[in-house]
Structure formats: C-alpha cells, structure tokens
Amino acid sequence: MTTRGNLRGPSTVEAFDDRSSTTPRLSNLHPMQLPDLLSARPSHALDRERVEELLERAFLGRDAAEELDRELAASAATDAAAGWELDLFAEDLFVRDLIADHFAITIDRLRFPPQSDFLFAVLSRPPVDPDDIAFRQSILRELEADPALERRLERLYREIFRFVDLLKQEDRSSKLDPETFRLDVLHQAKTVVETMADGFATSTSGLVRLHEAALEMRDGRAYRRLAALLDFEERQTTATLRVDLGVDGEIRRLAILDLEPNRASPFRVAWWKRAALSVVSFGSGHRLDRKVLVRRLLGKVFRDVLPDLVPLVQILGHLEVYLAARAFRRRMAEHGLDTSLAEIGDDLPVSLDALFNPLLVGDEAPRPCDLAQTSARRTTLVTGPNSGGKTRLLQSAGLAQLLGQSGLYVPARRAQLPLVRGLFVSLVETETAQAAEGRLGRELLRIRRLFSRLGSPSMVVLDELCSGTNPSEGAEIFRLVLELLERLGSVAFISTHFLELAQSLERERPLESLEFLRVEIDEGLRSTYQFVSGVARTSLAAETARRLGVTFEQLSALIDRRRAP
C-alpha cells in the first residue's frame, strides 16, 4: 500500500525499508572513521557497537547516562605504557582533585562540569610517542593563537554537550512528548554536524579532522535523509510512504519512497501532525495510529544515521581535554602563575622555571621555584627542615611530568622534561589498622613495588626514603636504592632527613648520577620555599619546635596555666 502525507524537508530522498532488524543499516556498510583528536595516528578505542546500543536505548527513552560515561572513560584507558599504572602515582598526585578544582570549563558564564572519569583516564595515561605529544600541543598552540577558532570550538562543544545531555536525561518519557523529544535529538545532531563542517575547514592542526569527519558524514545517504526530514524551516514537502499492515492493523513495514516540495501550501502545521492527519490506508479502511507512525519514521531515520552519531560521543571527550586545559591555563593566570607547553625528549634533563604546585592554588597563590637537573637521568636528593616545601616540590615535579607528557600545560613558566615510560610517586603514607607490616616493612615493600613494576626510563618521586628505620640500617637500604635507580636509568627526586648520609654522599660522590638540593633558609631561619644546590647542614628541629610552641619553656608555661586555680 502506498500512502501520502506531508513532511517538511528537501525534495528528494532515496527509499529505505524497515523489513527487519537483520537488514544492514546503510551507514554500517561504510562506517565513518572515528575522528581521534588525541593521537597523531588515529586509533579506534571506542566500542562502536556498544555505544550504538546505548544511544539507541537513550533515544527510546531509557537511561544510559552512566554507561555512556563508562564507555567514554574506557576508550582512554586502552593504550597506556606498562609503567603508567594508576596505583603507582595517581593517589599521591591527587589527580582527581586537580581535575575537580581547576579543569571545569566555563563558556559564556555557563559552567560545564568535566567528564571527570574520562579526563582522569587521559591524564593518567600519557602517550609515550613524541608524535602524539606534539599533536596535542599543536592544537593548544593554534587555539592560543586564534581566539576566534577557540570560540568556534567552544560552540561545537556546547552543541555536542547538548546532544549527549538530551540523551542522558532521565524520566523524559513521562515528562515530554516522545515524538517532540526525538525530533529535538535529531535536530541537535544535525546542528552538531553543520557546526563541525563549517568551523574548522582552515585549521592547521588536528582540529581539521572535525571538518573532514563532518563532510564524510554529510555525504552519507543516512545523513541526507536526516536532513531531508528535518528541513522544515523553509519549505513543506509531501512524503510518499509505503506502509505494510498486518491483519490487526499494526504496521509491519514502513518505507519512505519520495519527498516532494509543496511550497504552495498555505498551512504551517507541524509535519508530524500533518502526516498523522492525512495518512490513511484506503485499501483496508484502517486509519493508522498517529503516534505509532511518527515514532516509526523518527526511529527509522535515527537508526540509519546512528553509526555516524557514535563519533560525537568520542569528540565530546576529546574537546573537553583541550578546553579543560585552556581553562586550567586561564585559572592559573588569574593568580599570576605562568603555564607552558613542555619541550620533551628522550635524553633531556628536567628543567622547570617558576614551577608551582597547582594543588595549592586557592585564595592565595603558591610561591614558584626553579627545579633543574644538570643532565639526563639524574637522581636529586632534597634535604631541609620540615614544612620547608620539600614534599610539595616533589609533588610539583610529578604533576609537571604527568601534564607535560600528556601534551597539556605544565605548571611552570618554561618546561623541559624527559620522555619516560612510567611514573612512580610515593608521598603519602596512610596508616591502617589492617597493616600487616610495620613502617620498615612497608618501606621495603614500597621499594620492591617500585623496581618490580617500572621500566626504563621512568620518573621516580620518593618522599622521606627509609624514614621508617634507624639511620644505620636505613643508610644501607638508601644506598641500595640509589644504585638500583642509576642502573634502571631513571629520573629521580628523593627527599630525606638523613643529613649525615646525604652529606657523605655529597663529599664522596659514589654515583655519577647524584645531585643535591636543599631548602633555602633566610636570616630568620625560615624557609623561603626556594631550593639551592647542596645539602642542608641542620634540620632546624629546634627552630621548628619553637615556631610551633613545643619548647620546654613553652610547654611548661602551658602546664602552669592548667594548674592555676
């Protein structure tokens, strides 16, 4: 049976059939390449079939929000070097706190909460291919140089965010008319594709892949049909449909045979209402159910174009990486802190000018300092009093390596970093009631974990090595670790309170790779939070105790006050 109804759209569209779910979708015959904006050589980490299933479920009004987020995060976790394992560094660098505090995107005063799981996965698995790092940096440099391009990228991000957010809304079936909701989804998909196609044609970085992907999508038959059904702003058309009914009057098969313009019509009734009013089965006498017919039309168009919409989920995450990085840079600049893109190479020593710890950025800005090693693959021992900034310096070095090798902004005015294949950071020791070992045992297990899981070259950041045992036993273990780090070919930063040991190492120079930094102290015996070459001569324990009110006289005064009647 052939029936006619009114739709808004362009004049021609190829017929398609809805015979069964086993009929291959047109877009699946030649699925478009996922536009990877994070790798120089595009990879296909996103599970296309799974994301298609989730998008279709969401289009039908079922909740798929959390699963979509998980699939996006999983796509960033498949190509990590063996040494970039989360439990070796992420907790001590507070990566999730960094994202929550400083990576939120604000566009036109609207705050977009970051896809924290995806950003965490990207930041926690930096590339080991220099081409990938350079690829990401080139995008950020182009955005820096071209504010208009950055605004276009922000607009695209907002449009994709809205598309995905529409599909993530819960309980929409009871709150919205399903046909209106599905029309909104299809309209938003079309808006996204047109924004991609028009905004990045002249890009000189990897952002041009957005333009290329949009052109490929627009050239597909499925997308042309989507555009045909949605182009109802300027013209009205007549749709020729083929509907096969069962004996119960239910639709068994639906096909769009043709769309013809009907500009002379004086009516401006919504296309789905017009279709519903005029589609009648003359042969059987059945009047088709309006909602069923419209739902089938929209569902058919969505299913055919669905494979081309899968990339939008991946693009959303990739755009967020760059816009979040730009947000981080602006936020640091508001506090007078400079950030930069690092020069990274196999045999480069660490050299960071005006390095700061972004985790300390709040109401007040931290004090930047310089950190440099004289040559590649060195071990730097850091000494000085408690509360002198040693731990925060080590944490800053780890964050700089993590962000720099991710191709993003480093918390330093100028940055030069080695290309490493893993990162080990141990700064925070948490006591637990279930701990089977004492402090020395836990320290030995920490050392074993380091050498059993890191490859070469790697970066190692250790706070207060061997602090869990007496100096004589600790010194032997300490020397062992230093020798093994040199053999591993690692870049290392280690703080210690074993001042006599550090002083003897400075005098004897038993290892070629050793360098020494100490906390700079001012005339008032207070830390300047800067670091200079050498080993500290004293831990300033007495001065620290006085500052904190823990001298004999200060504590005695407290006792006397407690005894007073």
Image (spheres, grey):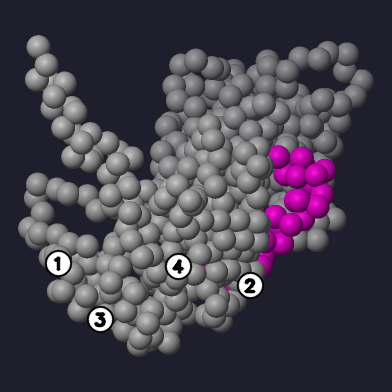
The residue wearing badge 2 is: 131
N-terminal-most mark, 3 or 1: 1
Instruction: Count every numbered label the image shows and give the total.
Output: 4
The residue shown at (75%, 26%) is: 7
Image quarter of the C terminus: top left
N-terminal-most mark, 1 or 4: 1
N-terminal-most mark, 1 or 2: 2
Q: Amino acid at mark 3?
A: Leu
Report the disc number at residue 470: 1
Q: Amino acid at mark 4?
A: Leu
Q: Nearer the viewer, mark 1 or mark 2?
A: 1
Q: Nearer the viewer, mark 3 or mark 4?
A: 4
Q: CA distance from mark 3 to mark 1?
A: 16 Å
* Main secondary structure along the magenta-highlighted residues: helix
Q: Quadrant of residue 517?
A: bottom left
The residue wearing badge 4 is: 517
The residue carrying pointer 1 sits among few (fewer than 14), some (14 to 19) or many (20 or more) residues within 10 Å by Cα, namely few
The residue wearing badge 3 is: 480
Q: Which type of secondary structure does the marked residue at label 3 adopt?
A: helix
Q: Which type of secondary structure does the marked residue at label 4 adopt?
A: strand
